[in-house]
Amino acid sequence: MVRLPLTPAEVERGQRLGALLRRARGHRSMLDVALASGISPETLRKIESGRVATPAFPTIAAIADTLGLSLDAVWTEISRTDHERACQDRSVLPVARHALAAS
Protein backbone atom coordinates (compact mmCIF):
# COMPACT_ATOMS: atom_id res chain seq x y z
CA MET A 1 0.00 0.00 0.00
CA VAL A 2 1.35 3.40 -0.97
CA ARG A 3 0.99 6.09 1.66
CA LEU A 4 0.18 9.54 0.33
CA PRO A 5 2.41 12.40 1.49
CA LEU A 6 1.05 14.44 4.37
CA THR A 7 -0.45 17.80 3.63
CA PRO A 8 1.12 20.88 5.21
CA ALA A 9 -1.94 21.12 7.49
CA GLU A 10 -1.43 17.54 8.69
CA VAL A 11 2.24 18.20 9.38
CA GLU A 12 1.38 21.36 11.33
CA ARG A 13 -1.31 19.54 13.32
CA GLY A 14 1.24 16.84 14.18
CA GLN A 15 3.66 19.50 15.42
CA ARG A 16 0.92 21.04 17.58
CA LEU A 17 0.12 17.60 18.98
CA GLY A 18 3.77 17.01 19.86
CA ALA A 19 4.06 20.39 21.56
CA LEU A 20 0.86 19.77 23.54
CA LEU A 21 2.09 16.38 24.74
CA ARG A 22 5.51 17.78 25.73
CA ARG A 23 3.84 20.54 27.75
CA ALA A 24 1.45 18.08 29.40
CA ARG A 25 4.29 15.69 30.23
CA GLY A 26 6.05 18.49 32.10
CA HIS A 27 8.83 17.17 34.28
CA ARG A 28 7.83 13.50 33.89
CA SER A 29 10.35 11.47 31.97
CA MET A 30 9.59 10.33 28.46
CA LEU A 31 10.35 6.76 29.57
CA ASP A 32 7.82 6.87 32.42
CA VAL A 33 5.05 8.29 30.24
CA ALA A 34 5.76 5.89 27.38
CA LEU A 35 5.76 2.81 29.59
CA ALA A 36 2.61 3.93 31.42
CA SER A 37 0.96 4.43 28.01
CA GLY A 38 2.03 1.03 26.71
CA ILE A 39 4.16 2.42 23.89
CA SER A 40 7.88 2.58 23.26
CA PRO A 41 9.85 5.65 24.32
CA GLU A 42 10.96 5.97 20.68
CA THR A 43 7.34 6.21 19.53
CA LEU A 44 6.60 8.92 22.09
CA ARG A 45 9.77 10.78 21.06
CA LYS A 46 8.72 10.70 17.40
CA ILE A 47 5.22 11.92 18.21
CA GLU A 48 6.49 14.72 20.47
CA SER A 49 9.01 15.83 17.84
CA GLY A 50 6.35 15.84 15.11
CA ARG A 51 8.09 13.11 13.09
CA VAL A 52 4.93 10.99 13.38
CA ALA A 53 2.32 13.56 12.45
CA THR A 54 -0.63 11.17 12.29
CA PRO A 55 -0.27 8.60 15.09
CA ALA A 56 -2.91 5.93 15.56
CA PHE A 57 -5.94 6.91 17.62
CA PRO A 58 -5.36 4.22 20.32
CA THR A 59 -1.82 5.53 20.76
CA ILE A 60 -3.01 9.10 21.32
CA ALA A 61 -5.81 7.89 23.58
CA ALA A 62 -3.33 5.96 25.74
CA ILE A 63 -0.91 8.91 26.01
CA ALA A 64 -3.75 11.35 26.76
CA ASP A 65 -5.07 9.04 29.48
CA THR A 66 -1.61 8.76 31.05
CA LEU A 67 -1.20 12.55 31.00
CA GLY A 68 -4.72 13.22 32.27
CA LEU A 69 -5.82 14.94 29.07
CA SER A 70 -9.29 14.55 27.64
CA LEU A 71 -9.41 13.62 23.96
CA ASP A 72 -11.78 16.54 23.41
CA ALA A 73 -9.17 18.93 24.81
CA VAL A 74 -6.44 17.36 22.65
CA TRP A 75 -8.55 17.65 19.49
CA THR A 76 -9.57 21.22 20.28
CA GLU A 77 -5.98 22.30 20.84
CA ILE A 78 -4.47 20.67 17.77
CA SER A 79 -7.31 21.71 15.46
CA ARG A 80 -7.17 25.43 16.18
CA THR A 81 -5.45 27.64 13.66
CA ASP A 82 -2.61 29.98 14.61
CA HIS A 83 -4.98 32.94 14.31
CA GLU A 84 -7.52 31.36 16.68
CA ARG A 85 -4.79 30.56 19.23
CA ALA A 86 -3.45 34.12 19.05
CA CYS A 87 -6.89 35.63 19.51
CA GLN A 88 -7.65 33.40 22.50
CA ASP A 89 -4.33 34.19 24.18
CA ARG A 90 -5.34 37.07 26.44
CA SER A 91 -1.73 38.01 27.19
CA VAL A 92 -0.76 38.73 23.57
CA LEU A 93 -3.05 40.73 21.34
CA PRO A 94 -2.64 40.17 17.58
CA VAL A 95 -2.42 43.94 17.03
CA ALA A 96 0.40 44.24 19.57
CA ARG A 97 2.34 41.44 17.87
CA HIS A 98 1.87 43.12 14.49
CA ALA A 99 3.00 46.47 15.89
CA LEU A 100 6.11 44.89 17.40
CA ALA A 101 6.95 43.18 14.14
CA ALA A 102 6.72 46.52 12.31
CA SER A 103 9.12 48.20 14.76
Image (cartoon, grey):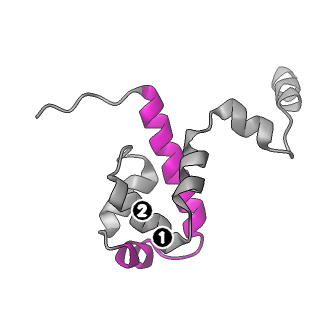
**Alpha carbon distance from label 2 to label 1:** 6 Å
Question: How many numbered marks have been drawn onto this rendered protein structure?
Answer: 2
Q: Is residue 21 above or below residue 4?
A: below
Quarter of the view holding residue 90: top right
CB under 8 Å between discs 2 and 1: yes
Please, what is the three-letter code of the amino acid marked with disc 1? Asp
Where's residue 29, x and y in %?
A: 48, 76
Q: Which residue is mark 1?
A: 65
- State the residue position of label 2: 61
- For the residue carrying disc 1, how many other residues have a C-alpha within 10 Å: few (<14), some (14-19), or many (20+)? some
Place residue 34 in its image quadrant. bottom left
The residue type indicated by label 2 comes to Ala
Label disc, if present, on residue 12 of the rendered structure: none
Residue positioned 44% across, 74% down in the render? 33
Q: Which residues are magenta?
A: 8-37
- Helix, strand or loop for disc 2: helix
Residue in the image at 56% along x and 71% along y: 68
